[in-house]
Image (spheres, grey):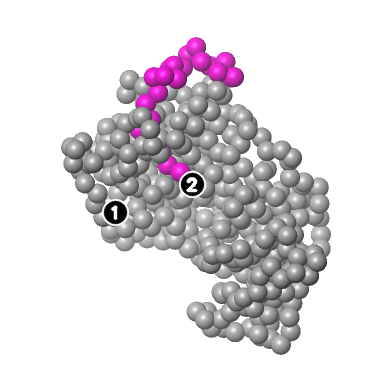
């Protein structure tokens, strides 16, 4: 089909495009007590996140219906997702009273889509004027096509849309082959090479870091040369103009409860973390572990699960630190494990305490009991709630990072076995 259209054929993608998320590195340790969780600011922590976007697979494809075919091999256009998103964005433009000053909906031409689990971003043009439409499960946001771009000093690159879900979309200097985007906030550092869509010089990045708490810089991709640990791109990226419209257009009902301890901690944790959580108000909160100044909670939204952990039991023991971990499945089936970090490092008095690790996962919603066998001679009953489980890993477990397993038995309320098997320990 690409030959018939005169388009370039498929090619192998460069490693930097496929490498969407490297593991983060952080030292952390501690010990937790049951407590209520006041809202406090996230701590200054030392974390290095090398890259970190959730991006769509970048392949040439035809849309599933009428519409343009993307000719740039670093981009794709999901036509059904684009149509749904643009209709929602147009609806919030209308409801916000901006339709008269906005291009008519039938003039919108989608150029490409970038998709994460619950975020869709469509790059749109009307008479070569670009704007961006972002939708999540519950919200729709559209940038202002009439806003004056705030170009970086010394280069023709500007952000046209920044959202709380981590979207950074804009126009790149036409001389740049790609956009190198670096970010720095109080908890992490990121670096990403972003392809540029031509014609139009458009780029979209869905970052794991909250733009409101992150300082971004951009530059032309310098190639594979090594960069120092604290490297930042040469041109500070100015904030994007305010969106033309943004609205909670599809609220979830019933609203998940946040009045219980697990809900309280989830709210505090996601607000305090520097990582983004799209549609956090729609997540159903599950199993919670608490201890001395530290908590760990698992939450679900449909098939997606996240872990949020943190508190005062890190670093100096005085400043709160929170972190969100998305679900990166290591196993398939009705039961799977989730990953997080070592919990805690010091107590509230600054005294070093033993660190703790968690064993977390997703189970069928009918699960009432989860028994864990870590090979220490004692079976542990995990905390179970709303299709999730959580337990502290006991002392004396295997240190075989590659082969160690945990025996897992899942029962429903009547004692019927829903699952019995072995899952990775690490």
Against 47, residue 397 (above or below) is below
Of the pair 218 and 100, the residue shown nearer to us: 100
Q: Residues within 10 Å of mark 1 (few under 14, many from 20)?
A: few
Instruction: Report which residue position mark 2 lands on.
Output: 116
Residue for point 61% across, 63% down: 334
Q: Residue at (56%, 81%) from the top-left corner?
A: 404
Q: Which residues are magenta?
A: 94-116
Q: Are marks 2 and 1 in contact (CB under 8 Å)?
A: no
Q: Residue at the top extreme?
A: 100
Which class describes the residues within 10 Å of circle 2: few (<14), some (14-19), or many (20+)?
some
In the structure shown, which secondary structural element does the residue marked by tag 2 occupy?
Answer: loop
When the figure is inspected, residue 291 is found, relative to residue 327, above or below; the finding is: below
- How far apart in space, not on screen, are marks 2 and 1 (Cα)? 19 Å
- Residue 379, percent from left and from top: 73, 80
Rendering coords of residue 198 (x, y %): 27, 35
Residue 94 position in % (x across, y down): 55, 18
Q: Quadrant of the C terminus?
A: bottom right
**Residue 419 is covered by the magenta coloring:** no
Left or right of 184? Residue 283 is right
Q: In the rendered image, is residue 77 in sight? A: yes
Badge number at residue 13: 1
The image quarter containing residue 72 is top left
Most foreground residue, 227 or 20: 20
Count of numbered tags: 2
């Amino acid at each position: 089909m690409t030959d018939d259209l005169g388009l370039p054929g498929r090619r192998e993608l460069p490693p930097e495009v496929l490498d969407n998320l490297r593991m983060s590195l952080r030292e952390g340790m501690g010990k937790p007590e049951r407590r209520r969780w006041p809202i406090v600011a996230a701590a200054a922590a030392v974390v290095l996140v090398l890259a970190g976007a959730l991006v769509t697979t970048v392949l040439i494809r035809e849309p599933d219906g009428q519409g343009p075919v993307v000719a740039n091999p670093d981009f794709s256009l999901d036509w059904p997702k684009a149509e749904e998103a643009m209709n929602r964005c147009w609806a919030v433009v209308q409801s916000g009273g901006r339709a008269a000053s906005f291009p008519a909906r039938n003039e919108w031409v989608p150029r490409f889509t970038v998709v994460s689990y619950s975020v869709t971003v469509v790059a749109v043009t009307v008479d070569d004027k670009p704007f961006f439409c972002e939708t999540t499960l519950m919200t729709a946001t559209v940038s202002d096509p009439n806003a004056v771009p705030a170009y970086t000093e010394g280069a023709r690159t500007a952000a046209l849309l920044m959202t709380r879900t981590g979207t950074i979309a804009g126009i790149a200097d036409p001389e740049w082959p790609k956009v190198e985007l670096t970010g720095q906030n109080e908890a992490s550092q990121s670096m990403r090479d972003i392809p540029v869509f031509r014609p139009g010089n458009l780029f979209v990045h869905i970052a794991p870091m909250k733009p409101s708490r992150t300082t971004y810089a951009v530059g032309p991709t310098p190639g594979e040369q090594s960069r120092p640990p604290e490297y930042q791109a040469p041109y500070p990226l100015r904030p994007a103009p305010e969106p033309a419209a943004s609205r909670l257009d599809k609220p979830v009902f019933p609203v998940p409860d946040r009045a219980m301890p697990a809900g309280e901690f989830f709210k505090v944790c996601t607000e305090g973390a520097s990582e983004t959580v799209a549609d956090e108000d729609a997540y159903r909160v599950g199993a919670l572990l608490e201890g001395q100044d530290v908590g760990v909670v698992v939450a679900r939204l449909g098939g997606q699960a996240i872990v949020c952990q943190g508190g005062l039991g890190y670093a100096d023991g005085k400043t709160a630190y929170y972190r969100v971990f998305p679900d990166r499945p290591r196993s398939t089936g009705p039961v799977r494990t989730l990953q997080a970090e070592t919990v805690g490092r010091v107590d509230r008095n600054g005294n070093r305490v033993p660190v703790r690790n968690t064993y977390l996962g997703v189970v069928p919603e009918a699960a009432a009991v989860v028994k864990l066998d870590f090979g220490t001679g004692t079976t542990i009953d995990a905390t179970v709630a709303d299709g999730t489980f959580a337990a502290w890993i006991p002392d004396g477990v295997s240190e075989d990072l590659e082969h160690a397993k945990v025996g897992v038995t899942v029962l429903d309320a009547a004692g019927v076995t829903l699952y019995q098997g072995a899952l990775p320990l690490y």
